[in-house]
Image: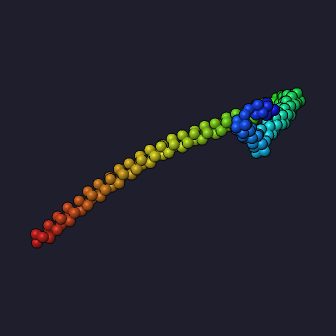
Amino acid sequence: MVYCLCFVAWCGSERKTKILAVINLLDVGEVYSRLLDHRPVIQGEIRYFVKEFEEKRSLRELRVLENLKTTIFETNERVLPKCEQAMQDNLSETFKRLQAANAMIHRLQEREYEVRKLQAEKVTAREEKCIAHWEEFMKEQQNKRAEVDEEHRKAMERLKEQYSEMEKELAKYVSF
């Protein structure tokens, strides 16, 4: 601004007014930017907020990662060996129990197989018995049918003889 005033003093009057108007206009722009244009201040505040947020976030994430690291280390060093030992201790007992249960199931299956086999043999024996009984029944029925047929044939012959005798006697009376 000092340079501008020196330049204005050196110039003529008409030019001076034009130059002073331009300088006033520049001053108004500077006043406007200082009073009403808050962008530089806001940008500075934003940069400060982002910087603070990133630093706090970074520290928070660092603490979380450190806690995770501690937890994993503790798990690997203390909990995992205890679990492995407990598993080894209980594994042999569990394996023995499993073998005993397997043997019991195997025996049960054998018994069930034997029972089913006996039942199948009984069913087969009953079927054979029923078939033999049926065949015997059918033979009896044929014999009875033959007897009934024979009795019927004899009864028919007797009836024929009786009717033929009756016809002969009736023929005697009709001729009278």
- Residue pushed farthest left? 175
Q: Is residue 78 left or right of residue 54?
A: right
Q: Is there any visible trace of residue 82 in the rendered image?
A: no
Q: Position of residue 98 (x, y in %)?
A: 76, 33
Question: Could you say where residue 102 lies in the image, as x and y percent from the top left?
Answer: 73, 33
Do we see residue 149 in this rendering? yes
Who's the residue at 81% across and 32% down the image? 2
Q: Tell how many labels.
A: 0
State which quarter of the image contains the C terminus. bottom left
Q: Camera-side residue: 118 or 22?
A: 22
Asked if residue 157 lies left or right of residue 57, the reply is: left
Along the line of sight, which residue is nearer the eye, 168 or 121? 121
Residue for point 32% across, 52% down: 150
Left or right: residue 53 compared with residue 169: right
Residue 136: name its quadrant: top left
Residue 83, how many percent across, how many down?
85, 31
The spot of residue 105 in percent (x, y) is 71, 36
In the figure, residue 12 lies in which quadrant? Answer: top right
Quadrant of the drawing holding the N terminus: top right
Residue in the picture at 44% in, 48% down? 137
Identify the residue at image location x=67%, y=36%: 109
- Front residue (pair 39, 113): 39
Quarter residue 85 falls in: top right
From the viewer's perspective, tell me whether residue 113 is left or right of residue 161. right
Q: In the displayed structure, would residue 122 be above or below residue 88?
A: below
